[in-house]
Every structure is written in structure tokens, then in C-alpha cells.
Image (cartoon, rainbow, N blue to C red):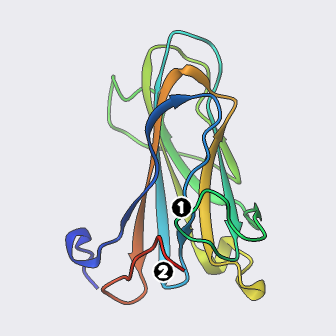
Amino acid sequence: MDLNLGEVQGIANVIYPQVGAVVSGINVKLSLAQKAYFICHVRQGAEGTATVFSVRQSTGNAGSATGDNEKAITNNCRIWSNLNCDADSVLTARTAAKTYSMGIDQSRSKIAVIEVVPEENMDVANSFNCVVVDTTAGNAANLMSVVAVIVPRYAPLPNALAD
């Protein structure tokens, strides 16, 4: 299947662009997804606190910042990042994990891509079908956002922000 994002409606805002130290994202339903890529962006301010993105799963409440039975993702996720987008656009594969720290380098734009494959990373046997990415340990000087790009199992994808 060719992936045309405009036709499958596979994009959801998880964290709208904002500054803050701790930001809760919006749960995205992945029960009909083949996989999802969570694109995490930080414009690191002039301070030395790393922004950490955490992947969590829940059994429902898509579209909300608080998922039902929310817990950490079951298995580590593949991650790629660019810790200095001002210099180039190359993503580097990182160690698979449930969280990712953007580092403490100041005055830089940084991007991390976290891949979630429901059957590989989530507790689907116990009805966990929603994922959220939250930030912790950031700083009010950091501008951050997260967008989910969802690859549907079948096109078109229904609303990923509704149960």
C-alpha cells in the first residue's frame, strides 16, 4: 500500500507547540494502526536541562491527556534523532528504549522519531490500544511539540483521537 498522508488522515497532534517543563500529551488510538511514528521536536533554550520524552500506553480514553489504566510501554521502541537540526537533517539510529532524552546542548533545534508497533511494543493481549508521549525534566525555556504519523492497517484510518 502506498502511504499518502492526506488520504489516510494519519496525523494527530499529541503535544501542541508550547513551552514547559512537564507536558502531558494526548492519547492516540492505535488499534487499527500498523505502526505510528511520534515526531518529537524541541527548540532547546539557553539552559542546561534535558527534555525527556516518555512513551506510555493505555486501554482507552483516546483524545484525552489521561488514559485508562495508563502504564509505561511494554517493550522498547526504535528511536532515531537529530540533536542539531540547525546543522543538518540526518537522523541517527539510537538505542531502543521507552524514554528518550534530547540532551543538554543549548540553543539548538532537535528532533526524535519514536516508532511504536502495537504488536511489538504494546500489551495488546490485555487490550492496551492507545499511546501517549509525555515530556518530563524539561524547562520553561524549551519549546516542544509531538506529532503522531500513523500508518494504518487499512485505509482510510478513522479518528485516532476517539475510542
How packed is label 2: few (under 14 Cα within 10 Å), some, or many (20 or more)?
A: some
* Residue type, mark 1 in image: Glu
Residue 145 vertical placement versus 44 (above, below): below
Q: Residues within 10 Å of mark 1 (few under 14, many from 20)?
A: many
Q: CA distance from mark 2 to mark 1?
A: 11 Å
148 versus 143 height, above or below? below
Q: Residue at x 32, y 30 (%)?
A: 88
Q: Residue at x 64, y 25 (%)?
A: 50
Q: Is residue 105 left or right of residue 87?
A: right
Q: Position of residue 100 (x, y in %)?
A: 64, 42
Q: Quadrant of residue 51?
A: top right
Work out which quarter of the rendered image holds the C terminus and state it.
Answer: bottom right
- Type of residue at label 2? Gln
Tag 2 secondary structure = strand
Q: Quadrant of residue 101?
A: top right
- Residue 41 visible in the shown view: no
Which numbered disc covers residue 42? none
In which quadrant will I find the N terminus? bottom left
- Look at 54% across and 57% down and name the residue there: 26
Horizontal side of 16 relative to 114 (left or right) equals left
Work out whether 60 lies above or below 13.
below
- Sequence-wise, the earlier of marks 2 and 1 is 2
Residue nearest the viewer, comparing 65 with 77: 65
In the rendered image, residue 150, in percent from the top left (x then y), is placed at 42, 70
Q: Residue furthest top?
A: 46
Residue 71 appears anywhere in the view: yes
Q: Which mark is residue 34?
A: 2
Mark 2 and mark 1 residues within 8 Å of each other at the beta carbon: no
Disc 1 target residue: 115
What kind of element bears circle 1? strand
**Image coords of residue 144 (percent x, y):** 47, 34
Q: Position of residue 18 (x, y in %)?
A: 45, 33
